[in-house]
Amino acid sequence: MARTLLDKIWSAHVVATREDGQDLLAVDRHYVHEGSFHAFGMLEHAGRAVRRPELTFAVADHYAPSAARPNPPMAADVAGMMVQLRGNAARHGVALLDLEDARQGIVHVAMPEQGLTLPGLTVVCGDSHTSTHGAFGALGFGIGASEVSHVLATQAIWQARPRSLRISVEGRLGAHVAAKDLVLAIIARIGAAGAVGHVIEYAGTAVRALSMEGRMTLCNMSIEAGGRAGLVGPDEVTFAWLEGRPMAPREAAWHAAVAGWRGLPTEDDAAFDGEVSLDGAAVAPSVTWGTSPETALPIGARIPDPAAEPDPVRRRTMEEQLRYMGLVPGAALEGTPVDRVFIGSCTNGRLEDLRAAAAVLRGRRASVPGLVVAGSTPVKRAAEAEGLDRVFTEAGLAWGEAGCSMCVGMNGDLVPPRERCASTSNRNFPGRQGPGSRTHLMSPAMAAAAAVEGRIVDVRRLA
Amino acid sequence: MVRGRGAVLDRANVDTDQVIPARFLRRPRGTGYGPYLFHDEPELLAAAAGAVVLFAGANFGCGSSREGAVYALADAGVRCVVAPSFGDIFAGNAGKNGLLTLALDEDATAALRAAVAGGGDVAVDLPGQTVTAGAVRLEFAIEPFRKRLLVEGLDDIGLTLLHAAALEDWAARDAAARPWMVPG
Ligand code: SF4
């Protein structure tokens, strides 16, 4: 029977099967961060050791300050998180990309960049956006703290076999339409729970045409549709991006690896449990209006009216979202004023993203405050080598050190209560960027355009 | 058997950032996470106050993988959440901490919700597989192994390590098949 990419990765990693049908999957890469302290605590409490430290990699990202390094000022409890991470990595022999390491960055930016995420691997991390790694044709999914402690101790994880959903996007994305717009359109189409229990495989000419950065953006937000993971079949684009990366296989090992990877993609006649298709050319720059990524709309749309929603729970949910966001039904989405912008995160903190934002900002001034934070220190250095940092600072935006920053505000970079933020991150949940913060998700180019105009605007007008 | 106040949260997509804001996740577990449950969500907090069983909207616990969301619910005394669907990671985390998640259609639970909204107590009998509120009783299905894990609170790392030989065999076979897999 013809097999999918998911089938191949899954069956290659099954170690045992339990009476309830769950499989024990071997884990090839386990990434940990400051927040993994709960799991290390459980491990130590049980007197257990890390089973395969050589497959475990740690990084400082969630609490990483955006102030200049070395020795950035840190609140005592943030500094404590760093100390804890260092201690856990050192005690268990786990390699750490520490705050001042030149390779540091958000786990979903830094690990691929180092060549650690490779096609066909199983990748887990105590972070839901581990779906990002699927861009390489690796099965990457987020897990909770108890599962992190289980993987530390066993290098394996029990999982029910997920269902499969193929999302095919044919045609070409329009000018100034990015992978972010595509994934927002997909989530709006299938809903925030549209892929619960499923692994999504993205296919079609529009997906093939994406760079690795774009594929990472796409897979990153699979979790916002409820997906267990996202996948893109590995191809020449994948191999070219990986070759020569510091931790990727080299020479004979590289050739052997690539030969194996060529056998991974889904076979022509393979069946999926679900199929969705979209026309790439129909995707417009997209922006969310509410407090779930599923509220994404094309920029030309109007804020919906709950009165038109027949389902009572949905209607209540919409009313609550409008109240929280301070918006009125029927108003045009374009023109909504914003108070600040954030450009960065594991969704849109890569070099291509910063270039797209800089292309809009070059020679212009932002009319609202904003923060640009590279997804990793190597991205930051590369952006500086191209002069992108100057484009941002000359426009009046702040240029921070790499980390999660204002995506989640754990390092203290917060959106003040009731302020409206145009953000390239992935979650517009209530309070996500700070208590009372109001988030509109969009692409880097759209966020840059919002910075210039001080309101949500179609970037195609500025181009 | 769990018995106590039931609460209805009639909102879809209640994410784990709403269940517990990020700023509390740095706290050690031992200090208790109960006070942070729905900390910035007064309406949800008021609805859930003192509840042992929550009847939530679709996709409850979506978003972040933070297990702190389960700690906050459990430490605040919630023992069971009933919803049409759950975030996958949240449901996994719940199971590891003895919090029962029951994925049941709105239609199936409409009568229970109505009974609970009237202020009545609710009882969840895991061994007997029933939820009861007033005169309304609903039977639910649960996979037997999952039930055993919840009822007996088994050490799952210990159970996995019973497969240590299989893990070693797999690693040896894999080292031959994919010698490039281990970095460096
Ligand atoms: S950038 Fe945001 S979504 Fe990504 S890992 Fe960091 S906190 Fe999570």
Image (spheres, helix red, strand yellow):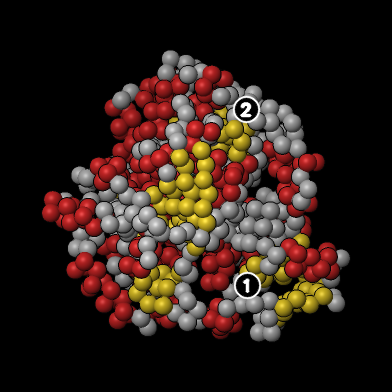
Q: Quadrant of residue B99?
A: bottom right
| Residue for badge 1 | B100
Q: Amino acid at mark 2?
A: Gly
Q: Amino acid at mark 1?
A: Leu
Secondary structure under badge 2? loop
* Chain bearing mark 2: A
- Closest to the observer, A204 or A19: A204
In the rendered view, does B90 fall on the left or right side of A52? right
Q: Is mark 1 within 8 Å of ligand 1?
A: no
In the rendered view, does A254 fall on the left or right side of A318? left
In this view, A443 is above or below A191: above
Q: CA distance from mark 2 to mark 1?
A: 44 Å
- Residue at left offset 75%, top offset 67%: B109
- Residue at left offset 75%, top offset 76%: B138
- Closest to the observer, A28 or B173: B173
- Residue A254's spot in the image, x, y percent? 18, 52
- Residue B2's spot in the image, x, y percent? 71, 78
In this view, B41 is above or below B92: above
User: Total of numbered circles in the picture?
Assistant: 2
**Discs 2 and 1 carry the same chain letter:** no
Crowd band around label 2 with a 10 angstrom C-alpha radius: few (<14), some (14–19), many (20+): some
